[in-house]
Amino acid sequence: MQAQFSQEFPKFKAKIQNFITTTKFKEKSAEYEELFNQMASVAPDDMKHYIEKSPTFLQARNKSLALMERIVAIHKELEEIFEMDEITLGLKFKYNLNEVDELIGNKVKEAANLVHQFGIVSEEGRKAIEMVDDPFLSQAL
């Protein structure tokens, strides 16, 4: 098992490098982390107007923040796996590259699903802000 793992590891590492390059993984990871930090750094007082006028805004903001936090965490978990050397990866996954592939695939799918959800929730938040900012729509609230 270990010998086969060592034989297949260079191909696996090349596949990971190709994935990182073609998906712009590092750039997206940095982008998601920056977005999360920006979202988390907005003081509640800065959102007070929207929070008071629209409970939908607060729900969307909290949900989008939680989604982005999980997206960042998944990217960090993947980065950790991608940076493992042959010995570390072999020991952690009992020399089973299929298990590593499956884990990476599941994490990538989860992250993609969360990014999709984030887009939907962020749009809900933007609509809530527009309603509060629009004098005609806000009268209806």
Image: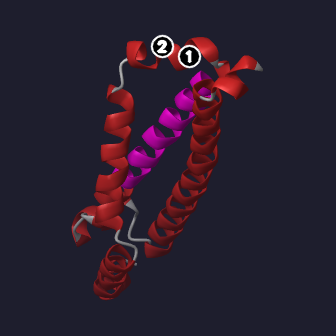
Q: Nearer the viewer, residue 42 or 76?
A: 42
User: Residue sitting at 40 percent across and 78 percent down?
Assistant: 1
Does residue 16 appear left or right of residue 121 in this picture? Answer: left
> Which residue is under mark 1?
51
Q: Does 45 sit above or below residue 28?
A: above
Task: Give the total of numbered labels.
Answer: 2
Disc 2 to disc 1: CB gap under 8 Å: yes
Q: Nearer the viewer, residue 85 or 65?
A: 65
Q: Which type of secondary structure does the marked residue at label 1 adopt? A: helix
Q: Tell me residue 131's x, y (percent).
A: 65, 30
- Tag 1: amino acid: Ile
Q: Tell me residue 12's x, y (percent).
A: 36, 81
User: Residue sitting at 48 percent across and 34 percent down?
Assistant: 65
- Tag 2: amino acid: Lys
Residue 109 belongs to magenta span = no
User: Residue sitting at 37 percent across and 85 percent down?
Assistant: 4
Residue 64 belongs to magenta span = yes
**Magenta highlight range:** 57-77
Q: Tell me residue 52's x, y (percent).
A: 58, 11
